[in-house]
Amino acid sequence: MLTVDAPSSGVRDRERRAGFRLPPGVGPVNLTGRQAPAIPPLQPGQSVLFDALLHHAPTWDDIAWLQSITRLPVLLKGVLHPSDARQAVAVGAAGLIVSNHGGRTLDTAPATASALPRVVQAAGGAMPVLVDGGIRRGTDILKAMALGASAVLVGRPAVWGLAHAGAAGVAHVLRLLRDELEIAMALTGCATLAEASPALLDADAIADSRG
């Protein structure tokens, strides 16, 4: 999974107010021993972000290169616009993840539920489209599937379960979500997830389909 829309961290006011910092010795293990890209000397008036950091941001060519050196599937996370979905199809990405990173990166980014149908349509069935953000109950999973998602990703609930009871807490969260999803499917007449469609979210369409 490669995050493609966050070359810089967003403005996270809550973390700043809380004084959050990673504890000493905690960091990305896959980058251990690697140095951050050097920032070239800047002229007066130049920006560290625009004249330095963004020069190292990944491009579509980098994604093609990454796919050429691994046999693992490369999924692109952070796709919210149909044009990016079409470009991902063109470079042969293995899948897309519709995500706004919990609204913590760009606070006015569209909700994933709003972006999902357009991204799914643009992908045209060429690859699976996953979604995260706001998945708190089984009904949220069913709604995401009805909007065209191939699967959902769960972040905070799993972290809360882990913090409370370790691996058993995570298993409990997943079990709750599955139970709630099955009940929601039964109550909406879906024998399989393949039967979930946008009509589930449109009262008028449901009434018309039942005559």
Image: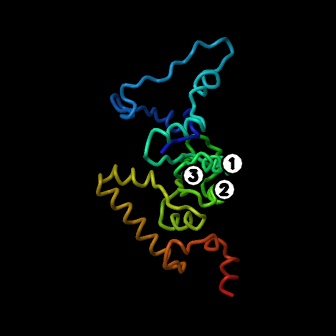
- Is residue 162 rendered to the left or right of residue 16? left
How many dots with numbers? 3
- Is residue 163 rendered to the left or right of residue 121? left
Residue corresponding to mark 3 = 98
Q: Looking at the rendering, which quadrant does residue 188 occupy?
A: bottom right
Residues tagged 2 and 1 counted as in contact (Cβ below 8 A): yes
SS of the residue under disc 2: helix
Task: Report the front residue among 38 and 199.
Answer: 38
Looking at the picture, which amino acid does disc 2 mark? Ala
Q: Nearer the viewer, mark 3 or mark 1?
A: 1
Q: What residue is shown at x 52% (from left), y 37% (from top)?
A: 65
Q: CA distance from mark 3 to mark 1?
A: 13 Å
SS of the residue under disc 3: strand
Is 89 above or below relative to 150? above
First in sequence: mark 2 or mark 1? 1
Q: Nearer the viewer, mark 3 or mark 2?
A: 2
x, y percent for residue 9? 54, 34
Can the viewer see residue 133? yes
Residue corresponding to mark 2 = 122
Q: Which label number is shown at residue 83?
A: 1
Looking at the picture, which amino acid does disc 1 mark? Ser
Task: Report the front residue among 73 and 30.
Answer: 73
x, y percent for residue 128? 54, 58
Q: CA distance from mark 3 to mark 2?
A: 12 Å
First in sequence: mark 3 or mark 1? 1
